[in-house]
Amino acid sequence: MEKCLFCEIAKGNIPATIEYEDENVIAFRDINPQAPIHILIIPRDHIPTVNDLTPDHQAIIAAMFQAVQKLTRDNKIDHTGYRTVFNCNRDGGQDVYHLHLHVLGGRKMTWPPG
């Protein structure tokens, strides 16, 4: 496997603006934000895509959404609104093949997104 950018961030080998971390996940600011608040939440374990999730990953997915709740409260967008997005594979817009959940907020979201 090639070196994974997000694995390297999770290990602390590549700097990032860390917003949250626990034993299962780490959250950091997106370097190419698409909204005033754009945070990525990743599992510490390397899981390439949504398609690679198994029942054994239930605690990781729960931790990702618990992080969403904390991050949206901390950034004061929990009541005004925000969007969460998993992109899967090339046509779904996934650029880094390490599962990641986008949290976007701080402006009105439109539909359809893309």
Image (cartoon, rainbow, N blue to C red):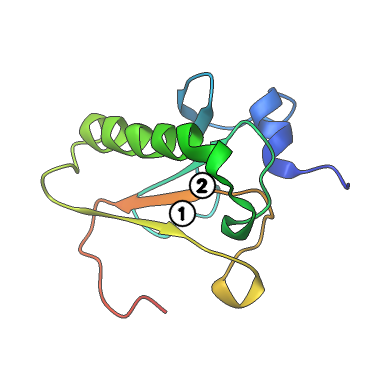
Image coords of residue 22 (percent x, y): 48, 20
What is the distance, in whole Å, between disc 1 and disc 2 at their CAs? 5 Å
Locate residue 102, reporting x and y percent. Answer: 44, 52
Amino acid type for the residue under numbered disc 2: Asp
Q: Crowding near pointer 2: few (<14 within 10 Å), some, many (20+)?
A: some
The residue wearing badge 2 is 30
Disc 1 to disc 2: CB gap under 8 Å: yes
Residue in the image at 66% along x and 48% along y:
98
Residue 23 location (% of width, % of height) = 53, 19
Q: Check the image and report above or below for 107 versus 5.
A: below
Q: Kindly identify which numbered label has been placed on residue 33.
A: 1
Q: Position of residue 26 (x, y in %)?
A: 52, 30
Q: Secondary structure at mark 1?
A: loop
Q: Nearer the viewer, residue 54 or 43?
A: 54
Q: Residues within 10 Å of mark 1 (few under 14, many from 20)?
A: few
Residue shown at the point (69%, 40%) measured from the top left:
46
The quadrant holding residue 75 is top left
Quarter of the figure with the C terminus = bottom left
Q: Splitting the image into 4 quarters, where does residue 94 fall? A: bottom right
Query: How many numbered discs?
Result: 2
Which amino acid, by three-letter code, is at mark 1? Pro
Seen at 54% across and 48% down, the residue is: 100
Instruction: Describe residue 70's horizontal placement relative to residue 50 as left or right.
Output: left
Mark 2: secondary structure: loop
Specify whether 1 is left or right of 54.
right
